[in-house]
Amino acid sequence: MTLPALRDVIAASRRLHGHIVRTPLMPSASLSARSGAEILLKLETRQTTGSFKLRGATNTLLLSGRHAKGVVAASTGNHARALAYAAREMSKPCVVCMSSLVPENKVVAVRALGADVRIVGRSQDDAQDEVDRLVISEGLLPVPPFDDERVIAGQGTIALEILEDRPDVDTLLVPLSGGGLAGGIAMAARSIKPSIRVVGISMEKGAAMASSLRAGHPVAVTEEPGLADSLGGGIGIPNRYTFDLCRTYLDDVILLTEDEIARGIRHAYMEEQEIVEGAGAVGLAALLCSRLNVSGTVAVIISGKNIDMIRHRQLVSEYRNV
Ligand SMILES: *Cc1c(COP(=O)(O)O)cnc(C)c1O
């Protein structure tokens, strides 16, 4: 099994042209003033379906979907939204299996995109078992949320866009869960610019990739609901690609508390006028809480915006002076 490489990301970038939004890389005046580095925000909140996951899902469908009867995935929400959208664009049926921990707003959104949502079990692994069953019984094409070479190449296109816009970027801050996003971005960025530093950022709760990197092999962790619900779930055992990519290409991994993540969400809203979900706000949170030293030019991947708006309103109304 060969790991996805830069050429796969370049091919994905050409393939995705016209199917996804090329998102803006916007300077943050407030974070730049505060940190002393030049901080740029890569706004995947502006991606169709509200997260970067459309890149990997669309790349997979364009590569392998033509002759499939339909597609199926287990997902904590954003991958499901992306896959449902991509499948509808190609007039393919889409089945999504979710655990009961997934917030209701995400279930409703995926059903609204025309997918058949099935709620099974209490973990990503239970949902995955149902996917495996449907692949065999209904002949659907499985599209994994992260551990797939086509998905990883799709997510990696974010690195190409950033380095095209700003070749002088020194550091990338990337949300990290299963590692499709961080693995793809880190591999592509380091292949183009070996001196670039790539830092993965997760929540302390159930940090599967961080625990696996520490152990030296993929390990299972207990899932816990948290503010960054898109960062929940394991990395899969066996893991085929993302563990090796993260081990090879990530310089560091930072874990954040719930309070720190909340601060990132509030900052996004009050200072950047952006609605950002917990997972999307971890890079902002790491900077605000001085969890790493930065200098030069830093690009922060703001990975998604799909937060329950009632929860968002509560969080931002707790705002004092962060
Ligand atoms: C899926 C997701 C992540 C994490 O991506 P992985 O490839 O699983 O590491 C981060 N942020 C958002 C908004 C997501 O939907």
Image (cartoon, rainbow, N blue to C red):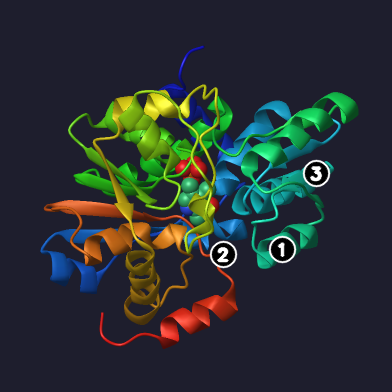
In three-dimensional space, the C-alpha distance between marks 3 and 2, rounded to whole angstroms, equals 20 Å
Task: Give the mark, 3 or 1, whose residue is nearer the N terminus.
Answer: 3
- Left or right? Give the position of 6 relative to 101: left
- Left or right? Give the position of 249 relative to 69: left
Q: Label 2 near label 1: C-beta < 8 Å? A: yes
Residue 229 vertical position relative to residue 61 in the rendered view, above or below: below
Report the amino acid beneath label 3.
Val
Residue 74 image point, x, y percent:
69, 42
Q: Quadrant of the C terminus?
A: bottom left
Which residue is painted at 73% across and 57% down in the image?
110
Q: Secondary structure at mark 1?
A: helix
In three-dimensional space, the C-alpha distance between marks 3 and 1, rounded to whole angstroms, equals 14 Å
Residue 36 image point, x, y percent:
10, 64
Q: Quadrant of residue 34?
A: bottom left
Regarding residue 67, the answer to whether it shows in the image is no
- Left or right? Give the position of 152 relative to 214: right
Which residue is tagged 3? 95
Residue 123 image point, x, y percent:
64, 45
Q: Quadrant of residue 102?
A: bottom right
Q: Secondary structure at mark 3?
A: strand
In three-dimensional space, the C-alpha distance between marks 1 and 2, rounded to whole angstroms, equals 10 Å
Query: What mark, if any, has residue 306 been given in the picture?
Result: 2
What residue occupies the far front of the structure in this picture?
A: 222
Report the amino acid beneath label 2.
Asn
Query: What mark, if any, has residue 109 been given in the picture?
Result: 1
- Left or right? Give the position of 296 relative to 256: left
Which residue is painted at 51% across and 77% down in the image?
312
Report the amino acid beneath label 1.
Ala
> How dense is the environment of label 3, judged by Cα within 10 Å: few (below 14), some, or many (20 and up)?
many
- The residue closer to the viewer here, 8 or 322, is 322
Label 2 beta carbon less than 8 Å to ligand 1: yes
